[in-house]
Image: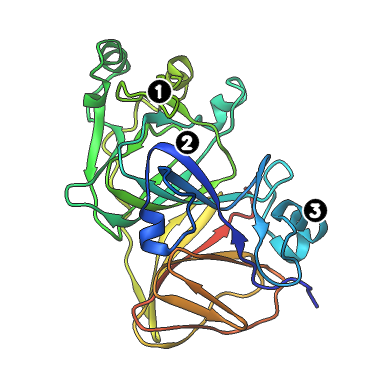
Amino acid sequence: MSRLYPLTFQPRFKERVWGGRSLERLYGKPLPPSRPIGESWEISDRPGDVSVVANGVFAGRDLHWLVEQHPGDLLGEAQLAAGRFPLLIKLLDARQKLSLQVHPPATAAVALQGEPKTELWFVAEAAPGAELYVGLKRGVTREDFERRLADGRVADCFHRVPVRAGDAMFLPSGRVHAIGAGLVIFEIQQNSDTTYRVFDWNRPGLDGRPRELHVTQSLASIDFDDFAPGLVAATAVQDGNFHRCELVRDPLFTVERYGVTGAGQVQLPQGRMQILGVVRGEVRLPDLVVRAGGFVLLPAGRPAGELRAARHTEFLRIEAGVGA
């Protein structure tokens, strides 16, 4: 029988010029005082930023140790990414707009000495009028983009999408994008941290100096045929006391949204590694309660066990692709 059990991790907080304090307000995260925290890395196996187990007999061990010591029980059929856990899970608090940016597609990443990054955004909170910048306005050419980049009006090339809580946007590598101000987002992505900034609104960074831009790399990465992408369109299916809808099924990861309509047990697939991220309410596993803003990793080899949730609980269920 597997020694592994449902695992929670200590979050790693990242100060960002565009960040705020909403993760403390919404989820009680123990943020360092008086700093604008833009990211909470909830499950990470990045060099120098590996998540540490917070519960049970493996408390104090890190995720990379688990990958090395218990790969089969942890991952099942999910594939590693360059020897590391295949996903990176974050919470984002954007009090200001993020930079206009792009992640390189696999076809360009090696030549640019970067890593591809495909991701999903799930909007947990949105201020009135909040929007995303995603893809290009229909008809914008590369020449238009470069000309407006030179004259400081490149934001005019971006397709803007109004959003509210519960919306989701899929971002394959190569899709130019930015998160607008006033948003809290659950971000699910492949294990990568390569971002090329196109434009940063002429603002200073945390050190008072402009942040570095990566115009050459960005132009080599942007999909200039990617016009006016829409939000994820998903249909919910009722299953007993809960409903679920598939937000994305990609070779890299699958994400489903669960909404509990009646308190009680929720059946989840068995025999595969999955991550639950609680959007609101709470879920209960044996010896563990996961509340809003929390994540739990369910190892593939864990014994079958029930998950219970109160009415109106909402959570995301995440699986890594078997061919990631």
Q: Which mark is residue 173?
A: 2
As shown in the figure, which amino acid type bears the numbered disc 2? Ser
- Whether residues under marks 2 and 3 lie with C-beta atoms below 8 angstroms apart, the answer is no
In this rendering, the label closer to the viewer, 2 or 1: 1
Q: Is residue 87 visible?
A: yes
- Whether residues under marks 1 and 3 lie with C-beta atoms below 8 angstroms apart, the answer is no
Q: CA distance from mark 2 to mark 3?
A: 28 Å
As shown in the figure, which amino acid type bears the numbered disc 1? Gly
Q: Which mark is residue 182?
A: none
Would residue 8 be found to the left or right of residue 58 on screen? Answer: left
Figure check: 39 above or below 267: above
Q: Which residue is mark 3?
A: 68
Residue 198 or 171: which is nearer the viewer? 198
Residue occupying image coordinates x 22% and y 30%: 138
Q: Secondary structure at mark 2?
A: loop
Residue 96 or 122: which is nearer the viewer? 96
Q: Which mark is residue 208?
A: 1
Of the numbered discs 2 and 3, the one sitting upstream in the chain is 3
Of the numbered discs 2 and 1, the one sitting upstream in the chain is 2
Q: Position of residue 69 (x, y in %)?
A: 82, 58
Crowding around mark 1 (Cα neighbors within 10 Å: few <14, some 14 to 19, many 20+) is: few
Q: Position of residue 113 (x, y in %)?
A: 62, 23
